[in-house]
């Protein structure tokens, strides 16, 4: 997914700006896309549990970015050591969700220059 964006001269999108993220999330919700998920440029591949954007800046944990998971309704990634890439998860109204980095056919990249 990241390689796709880099081949176009860009990278996966950084959504650290909450206003831009909110606008993008509302846009996707308005399109009424059936179960279409999107890769974003956040990962904890290098250090488990320490999420960073492609530029190395830290990813904000919790509200208002991450989806609710589990019986404790924790709003943070829950993929452990196997789900190290972040996506906008259509199942959770385009909040962030951790997912398998190797899955390239079910999730589409959002690139930026």
Image (cartoon, helix red, strand yellow):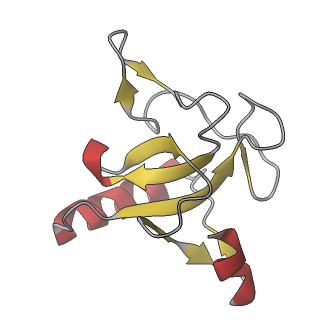
Q: Is residue 36 left or right of residue 98?
A: left
Q: Relative to 89, is 10 above or below?
A: below
Can you say which quadrant of the picture contains the N terminus? bottom right
Q: Is residue 10 left or right of residue 37?
A: right
- Displayed quadrant of residue 51: top right
Q: Is residue 22 left or right of residue 83?
A: left
User: For the image shown, how many numbered marks are present on the structure?
Assistant: 0
Q: Residue at x 80, y 58 (%)?
A: 55
Quick one: 93 or 70, which is closer to the camera? 70
Counting from the top left corner in percent of width and height, residue 22 is at 38, 53
Counting from the top left corner in percent of width and height, residue 101 is at 62, 54
- Displayed quadrant of residue 63: top left
Q: Relative to 36, is 4 above or below?
A: below
Counting from the top left corner in percent of width and height, residue 39 is at 52, 61
Q: Is residue 16 visible?
A: yes
Q: Residue at x 68, y 47 (%)?
A: 43
Can you say which quadrant of the picture contains the C terminus? bottom right
Q: Is residue 67 left or right of residue 90?
A: right
- Displayed quadrant of residue 21: bottom left
């Amino acid at each position: 997914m990241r390689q796709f964006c880099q081949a176009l001269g860009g990278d996966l999108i950084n959504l650290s700006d909450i206003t831009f993220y909110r606008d993008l999330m509302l846009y996707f919700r308005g399109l009424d896309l059936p179960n279409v998920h999107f890769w974003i440029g956040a990962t904890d591949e290098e250090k488990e549990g320490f999420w960073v954007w492609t530029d190395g800046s830290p990813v904000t944990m919790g509200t208002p970015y991450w989806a609710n998971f589990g019986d404790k309704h924790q709003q943070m990634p829950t993929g452990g050591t196997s789900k190290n890439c972040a996506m906008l998860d259509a199942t959770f109204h385009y909040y962030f969700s951790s997912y398998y980095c190797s899955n390239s056919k079910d999730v589409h990249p959002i690139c930026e220059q």
